[in-house]
Amino acid sequence: MVKPFCEYLRVKLQEYINKVSNRLLEHDLFYGHGTDNAIDEAAYLVYISLGFDLSKDIDDGRELSDIEISEIDRQVSERIEERKPVAYVLGKSWFAGRLFNSDKRALIPRSPIAELIRNRFEPLLADTPGRILDLCTGGGCIGIAAALEFANSNVDLADISIEALALADSNIALHNLSVRVRSIRSDTFESLEGKYDLIVSNPPYVSRQEHDQLPREYAHEPKMGLISDDNGLALPLRILREAADFLNDDGVLILEVGYSHELLAQRLKNVPLLWLEFEYGGEGVLALTAAQLQQYRASFK
Ligand SMILES: C[S@@+](CC[C@H](N)C(=O)[O-])C[C@H]1O[C@@H](n2cnc3c(N)ncnc32)[C@H](O)[C@@H]1O
């Protein structure tokens, strides 16, 4: 007998999210790829799986069909059994209020720089940036979110990984930005030309030893996106050394070094690093002007 259609509409959204959260809590999972607890992760998984726009109000009383439930139950099993981060299970991630394609070709977007973008980097920029560089772009989330915030800016997305850039290209297409945003394969600044008003970078900054101790979830992400030599500082220091040559006179570098910030601050005691503060959490993001990068270049060894 065919099931009456109304029987498919049974479980309310909030009730189902609680069930998913309880399932997640039964396992020793690590949260840190966009959320930091089971209930937020459950809501994130369910909302994105159902195609909700997270920037809009969501009706928690909406009911789910059996088909929706069985698909999400399968995704929850994949999250649990393979310790796969939700963004890779869904093939989507949410960053700075925007949806991105996300898969193992690039790290899952989670940088606190999202908050700076949404605040248009105020008060760090003298003017609206004409040219922006997202160095170590991965799937392109930072540069693309910045391009959407600054509607007249041209944005370059640079990365050494061809795979990551292919994902970035799919995100340029997703947001219809091919006129103003391009991807460039480059080992830091090597293949880049001209000067930028704003350089934003979230490079790899995890040491090899730390990487080996990370929870299983991180093993799904490309090592090239995480590991940096010299206790995690090799790439950040290289960017600090080279950035001045690619910034206009009133340009600014925003650089994320995450929990390596204490080590970097110790090494660069003489440099007035401006550590930015975040309302919604996160740390280890610094700002330096083009003039400061010039002045202290010799320190970035
Ligand atoms: C931490 S991920 C950041 C991805 C993205 N920007 C984000 O915030 O989610 C670092 C990225 O740096 C890239 N990368 C590593 N070494 C590089 C180098 N020498 N030059 C350019 N990009 C590099 C990796 O391929 C990876 O995509």
Image (cartoon, rainbow, N blue to C red):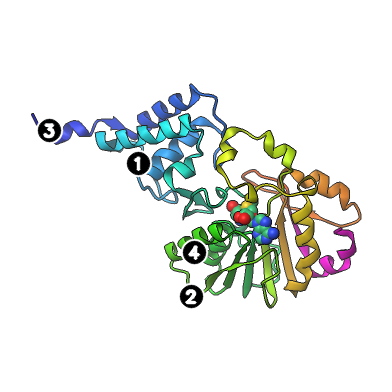
Residue at left offset 62%, top offset 50%: 111
Residue at left offset 77%, top offset 73%: 245
Distance between mark 1 and mark 4 Cα atoms: 33 Å
Point out the frontmost of discs 3 and 1: 3
Would you say 152 lies left or right of 235 here? Answer: left
Point out the frontmost of discs 4 and 2: 4
Q: Does 203 appear above or below 47?
A: below
Residue 202 visible in the current orientation = no
Residue 87 visible in the current orientation = yes
User: Which residue is denoted by mark 1 in the rendering?
Assistant: 59
Q: Earlier in the sequence, mark 3 or mark 4?
A: 3
**Element type at marker 2?**
loop
Q: Quadrant of ligand 1?
A: bottom right
The location of residue 188, given as percent across then percent down, is 70, 63
Residue extent of the magenta highlight: 286-301
Residue at left offset 76%, top offset 45%: 260
Q: Which mark is residue 169?
A: 4
> Does the magenta run of residues contain 150?
no
User: Which residue is denoted by mark 3 in the rendering?
Assistant: 4
Point out the frontmost of discs 1 and 4: 4
For the N terminus, the quadrant is: top left
